[in-house]
């Protein structure tokens, strides 16, 4: 006895399901390619930025993370180490060695807060404050290296800030167990 043959409609439905499944699998597979990863594009851009900063900041005797510390101190003035870390999104284990090297270079001073003995404040020294004048060329040179217009960079920065905010929210939700 022969098995019943599927009707044309059943054949098309089965083919359509199989086709959709394979298209979905193929589509999902494409998203596993390195060149499709937004995080890798950001990582590569960050490394490229660091390379440009390395060359530009060499004249100032700073690394990129040290430059970021100085930017915050030039903008905010003396800050507790904890607040400085919050501005830079760095933990104390990463920030402490940076501050130690900046202090050894005579650019910052760390001292116990008069208001709270548990807190250590960081402030630029006179040499650190003077370095600001020499650093004024850095942003212009970075903009030039990108080949972008200022308006394009401002729009990109705004979108990256939005992305950071969205990812911070997603991280907090994941940590709470609510996707």
Image (cartoon, rainbow, N blue to C red):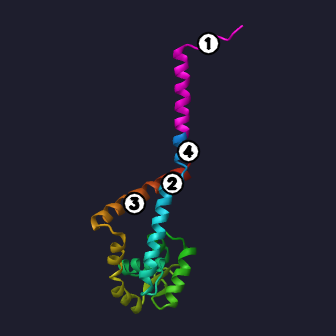
Lower sequence index among marks 1 and 4:
1
Q: Position of residue 143 (x, y in %)?
A: 33, 72
Query: Cα distance, mark 1 to mark 2?
Result: 54 Å
**Residue range corresponding to the magenta coloring:** 1-25
Q: Nearer the viewer, residue 110 or 39?
A: 39
Where is 22 relative to 85, above or below? Answer: above
**Image depth: mark 1 or mark 2 in front:** 1
Of marks 1 and 2, which one's residue comes earlier in the chain? 1
Residue under pointer 2: 172
In contact (CB < 8 Å): disc 1 and disc 4: no
User: What label sits on residue 160 in the rendered view?
Assistant: 3
The stretch drawn in magenta includes residue 18: yes
Residue shown at the point (46%, 70%) measured from the top left: 48
Which percent across, then down, holds residue 111? 49, 86
Does the magenta run of residues contain 123? no
The residues tagged by marks 1 and 4 sit, at their Cα atoms, a distance apart of 34 Å
- Report which residue position mark 4 lands on: 29
* Drawn side of residue 68 relative to residue 12, left or right: left
* Dominant secondary-structure state across the stretch colored magenta: helix
**Mark nearer the N terminus (4 vs 3):** 4
Residue 122 image label: none
Q: Residue at x 32, y 67 (%)?
A: 148
Q: Position of residue 57 (x, y in %)?
A: 43, 82
* Disc nearest the viewer among 4 and 3: 4
Q: Earlier in the sequence, mark 3 or mark 2?
A: 3
């Amino acid at each position: 006895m022969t098995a019943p043959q599927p009707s044309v409609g059943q054949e098309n439905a089965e083919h359509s399901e199989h086709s959709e499944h394979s298209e979905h699998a193929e589509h999902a597979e494409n998203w596993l390619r390195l060149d499709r990863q937004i995080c890798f594009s950001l990582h590569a851009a960050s490394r490229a930025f660091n390379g440009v900063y390395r060359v530009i900041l060499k004249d100032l005797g700073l690394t990129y993370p040290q430059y970021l510390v100085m930017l915050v101190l030039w903008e905010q003035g003396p800050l507790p180490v904890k607040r400085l870390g919050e501005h830079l999104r760095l933990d104390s284990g990463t920030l402490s060695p940076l501050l130690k090297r900046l202090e050894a270079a005579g650019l910052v001073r760390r001292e116990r807060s008069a208001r709270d003995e548990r807190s250590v404040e960081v402030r630029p020294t006179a040499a650190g404050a003077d370095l600001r004048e020499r650093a004024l060329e850095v942003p212009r040179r970075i903009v030039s290296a990108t080949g972008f217009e200022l308006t394009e960079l401002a729009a990109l920065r705004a979108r990256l800030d939005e992305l950071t905010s969205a990812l911070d929210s997603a991280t907090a939700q994941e940590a709470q167990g609510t996707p």
